[in-house]
Image (cartoon, rainbow, N blue to C red):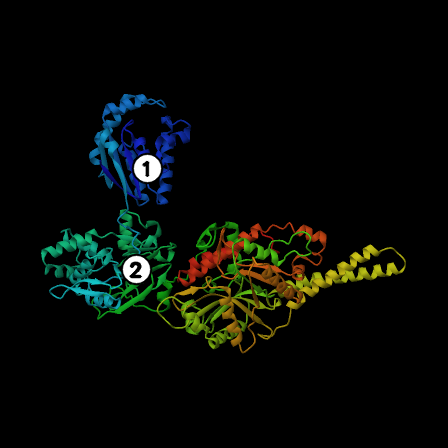
Amino acid sequence: MTTLDVPALSLVVLVGASGSGKSTFAARHFGPFETLSSDWCRGVVSNDPDDQSATAAAFDLLHHAAGLRLRAGLLTVVDATNVQPHARRSLVELARAHDVLPVAIVLDPPHEVCVERNAARTDRSVPERVVTRHRDQLRRSLRGLSREGFRTVHVLRGVEEIDAATVVRCPLRSDRRGETGPFDVIGDVHGCRSELETLLGRLGYRLVLDDRARPVDAVHPEGRRALFLGDLVDRGPDSAGVLRLVMGMVAAGHALAVPGNHEAKLVRALDGRPVQTAHGLAGTLAQLTAEPEEFRRQVRDFCDGLVAHLVLDEGRLVVAHAGLKEELHNRASGRVRAFALYGDTTGESDEYGLPVRLPWAQDYRGTATVLYGHTPTADAVWVNNTMCLDTGCVFGGRLSALRYPEKEVVQVPAEQVWCEPARPFLVAGPAAEATRDPDVLDVSDVLGRRVVETALAGRVTVGEENAAAAFEVMSRFAVDPRHLLYLPPTMSPCATAPEGSDLLEHPAQAFAQYASDGVDRVVCEEKHMGSRAVVLVCRTAEAAGGRFRLPSGRTGVVHTRTGRPFFDDGRTEELLDVVRSAADEAGVWASLGTLLPGDDPGPADWLLLDAELLPWSLKAGDLLREQYAAVGAAARASTRATVEALTAAAARGLDVSELLARTARRAADADAFTAAYRPYVWETDGLRGVRLAPFQVLAAGRTAGGATFEQRDHLWHLGVADALVAADARDVLLTTRRLVVDPADPDGVAAGTRWWTELTAAGGEGMVVKPLANLVRGRRGVVQPGIKVRGREYLRIIYGPEYPAPANLERLRSRNLGRKRALALREYALGVEALHRVVADEPLWRVHEAVFAVLALESEPVDPRL
């Protein structure tokens, strides 16, 4: 049996004369969609797979389809004769263009077998002279296949060898996705052995010494592994010692490593090839000269055997010396290796004689974390889910490591300046930040058709027209994107009450829906008649500036559910001070701090609240004046005048009783309409009259990291809100009344219904029914996070003064809630996704991908009254 090793991502080119068995071989060893046949492509473009005049068009199609598959990271097999050099050349170029390895599998059965098989075919006839020509071309090509660019060439001779062959798909050397860590990723060492030993000690490793007291390994008691980002050598005082230690760690399985450009140059020098010994290479070679020949050979083989980049932790982590763009992850080509070693260079030199490199990290939009070194920076900072860990130890800076997956930076200072840098790099302040700003959004991050991956709802699609509408709102009216962490989802109303009821919405339908979803307990929360508000408050000014880059004098934001600021005056900071003081007094900062990840027992530095801001008129004043008040005034004036006229007519003996009764009902409806919205309107002066009712803790965190709390039940959230209300000395914060109900228990349902009736009879809007456990997955996926049940009189504001009339109610019962329910679930999933990305310290564009999508979905064609 012959085993054919084929890279898991590669372009496999089958080579053989007509009748050699290529299609049979492909069907046996590869999937039906993995193989692209030239005959099939001829049939697609001409309706005749034997039409040789369609060959050019057929191969255009084949190359295009192969390119799409390779771009998607899919192994692709080309089933054609491929016996001519120009046909293979185009396929090798295609593989290089997509940074995959080209593999040739040659099938070479005897001439008579090919002729016999072609004679037996019923779909077409291939003359023997064609088979002879194919075999002659194949014979001339065999020796040169490797020189043509094929990384691997498998030649199978004879029918038995072809039939006995087995294809084994081998992962690329860069593919270490099964290794999940934890890792300690270490930046450029450059011969600084003493600093490396100190850093390893700080990371918890125990050095292993040889009989000459030289470190030859380092072991972590918890099984962590070091991961070196290259440039171990040159410029520093002990490159040989660094190599001895790192090589020992890698050999023992206690470390992984990728090469740097300095290792690549060292290999060429040790091979005797001509190189310039600048940039510290001369010193390394001198140090190695003092070592035994065997050690130098081990160094050469170790450096030469390193893979240019590694993909780890199920694809969530990529390491390369100079970084790597997303489209090059887990690919193999000269271009991939060059990028990993040298970065994205222009080919030019700057005023210091160093290569000009393009800032690829600023445009990075991948989901994998990329850790790299190569270009020394003053600080290790996150830029779009990437981090450079070369902080210039050899130049007098620091040697840096990142604990993964904890994302904690650990550093030790250089013991001295071992080499003067050609270009200054220890730059701090705005100038440095301007070139490495993780909080930069590009219009391409939000415009166009978007697909957002969420943990709760999978892929959520946003249409191009929705994105354009949202961009208009956000660019003109929203708060600074760096402070816009979350937008609340829309909320679905309960199912419509059945016929025979004089109500459009009733608690029984909400309870029934949750009971059918298998939710055993729900909490009914009072629905405040105000405006939804998201409140970001920082404990200190330092936290506000450090975590969210809030300008001096600002410690948070208060914005609407569409991202607009609530106040354009000093009331924002005044309200934030109320919340912050209450959190101080109630010990909320400390209690939330104990729930945050990490070993720091300290308090939380920031808090994100979901709340209701009252009165409704505070934000909806124009709506009340121009729409509701105008409608109410016009309705009252017209109906009263009509009632007076009809009353006078009746007094004169005219029979207008039916019209008078109908008009009187309309007049009563107009009065009820005005009475419905008036309780939600009152005067405010500064914070006097303003009330904030927090009801959920969305997230909290420190300067780095944080946690979300959708897994905490609603009584916990309301308990935190109650603590804030109780500690508020200014009487601004407002409690949210609640009642816990078993939706499957008739007595519980009756109690919940009575509670709702009391709320609405007293002029309240109604209630929101939520699963007590908060985030709940039912039989059909995530259940609705909340269902609103609005009272009869509040719905008069929404649907108009005369909506309770039987004929109007009958028409409204046909309202379609399917779109609204689906929209509520998608927006909820996006909101939770945004919060998860915030606390994971993901780059701004990743957070706003989800936040912006919520706003975009708000332009979906859904009845706004629902």
**Mark 2 residue element:** loop
Quarter of image, res 620: bottom right
Q: Amino acid at mark 1?
A: Phe
Per the model, the C-alpha gap separating discs 1 and 2 is 36 Å
Residue that mark 2 sits on: 182
Residue lying at the far bottom of the rendered structure: 729
**Residue identified by numbered label 1:** 30
- At label 2, which amino acid type do we have? Pro
Q: Position of residue 611 (x, y in %)?
A: 53, 66
Closest to the observer, 300 or 716: 716
Residue at figure coordinates x 56%, y 76% from the top left: 731
**Is 296 situated left or right of 26 in this image?**
left
The residue that appears at 78% across and 62% down in the rendered structure is 640
Place of residue 70 in the rendered image (x, y in percent of width and height, measured from the top left) = 35, 43
Identify the secondary structure beneath mark 1. loop
The earlier-in-sequence mark between 1 and 2 is 1
